[in-house]
Amino acid sequence: MFCNVEENCVITAIDVPSVYLIPGEIEKQGMGEILSKKLGLNLPSEGIEEWDKLAKKMVKIKNCDEGNKITIGICGNYNSLSDSYASIIEALHHCSANLDVEVCVKMINTENIEKNSEKIVVELSDVNGIVVPGNSGEEGWEGKISVIKYARENKIPFLGICLGLQAAVVEYARNKCNLGDANSTEMNPNTKNDVITLLDVQQKVVNKEGAMRLGSYKSILKEGTIVRELYSSTNVFERHRHKYEVNPSYHKVLIDNGLVLSGVWENGLLVDYIEIPKNVHPYFIATQAQPELKSRLESPSPLFFGLVKTAKGLKNKNE
């Protein structure tokens, strides 16, 4: 009344258990048809049945029994506010609906683990998988490395993102390549084994943003690797925001000691993906990119999908 909107064009915004149910509820009221007529759009005839099916499954899964639940630990710095990792949490939930398993997220502060190493067993004893996300700065850095070492040695499915890849490379260099003082020059500018560093061309850039790889970049995936299998493609595009890289001078020693550099930027020098073969570890993958940003309910991020699928399979196998 008094708003100059036709009665049949008034759409009710009702409360629903999940934001993913909203498109279906709006479509039931004819939103698609209204927009098509008003704007002269030629909308596709197929509806959103598949989306609605997945959305309802997400709601249903939250009430499943314990046997159909897994716990994924997000091991980072900003755990007091879960919204800090909103994209990662949503990427995990996208996998829930597509794999019929409830993913319970456990926030684990790596600064606390760094201060008290005994906490690592307590914090990780009940997780089925681990994500080490990106951030900047040295806070919790050694805690992240300890978490990754624990995941590698105890065969816990692991996904490293951005700084998580850098921490994984440092951990591997220290404990598998006998480079005990390996580090990132971001954390220790004087380290003798700078397995993570700024490349020469980046060091000449004064503006910090100018030294970054920022935005969508193309990666070439190596034949026969897990990431190639997950993406079902030779070339992939993911979003990046970082400036430190795996030092090309250490590629050979990492490879010789069993680490697979499974994806590189198209120039062949910059490492975008690493992994440990399946016959050594069930799921140990890290990427310099941030794949959670492209994950969608109807098409979950392949790396998160692989993590959740492996964690679910291992839990079912061990029960």
Image (tube, rainbow, N blue to C red):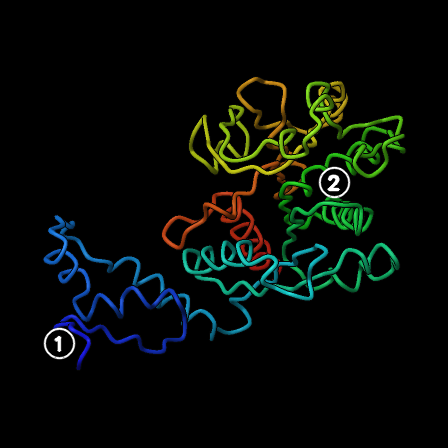
Quarter residue 171 falls in:
top right
Residue 161 in sight in this render? yes
Dot 1 and dot 2 residues touching (CB under 8 Å): no
Q: Is residue 51 left or right of residue 188?
A: left
The percent position of residue 183, horizontal first and vertical second, equals 82, 34
The percent position of residue 41, horizontal first and vertical second, equals 14, 50
Q: Which residue is mark 1?
A: 7
| Residue at 80% across, 60% down | 121
> Identity of the amino acid at label 2?
Ala
| Residue at 47% across, 71% down | 62
Does residue 71 sit above or below 131 in this rendering? below
The quadrant of the image that shows the C terminus is bottom right
Upstream in sequence: badge 1 or badge 2: 1
The percent position of residue 55, horizontal first and vertical second, equals 36, 64
Viewer-side residue, 36 vs 264: 36
The percent position of residue 26, horizontal first and vertical second, equals 25, 68
Q: Which residue is mark 2?
A: 167
Q: Secondary structure at mark 2?
A: helix
Does residue 312 sit above or below 12 in this rendering? above
Q: Is residue 209 left or right of residue 46?
A: right
* Label 1 CA crowd tier, 10 Å (few <14, some 14–19, many 20+): few
The quadrant of the image that shows the N terminus is bottom left
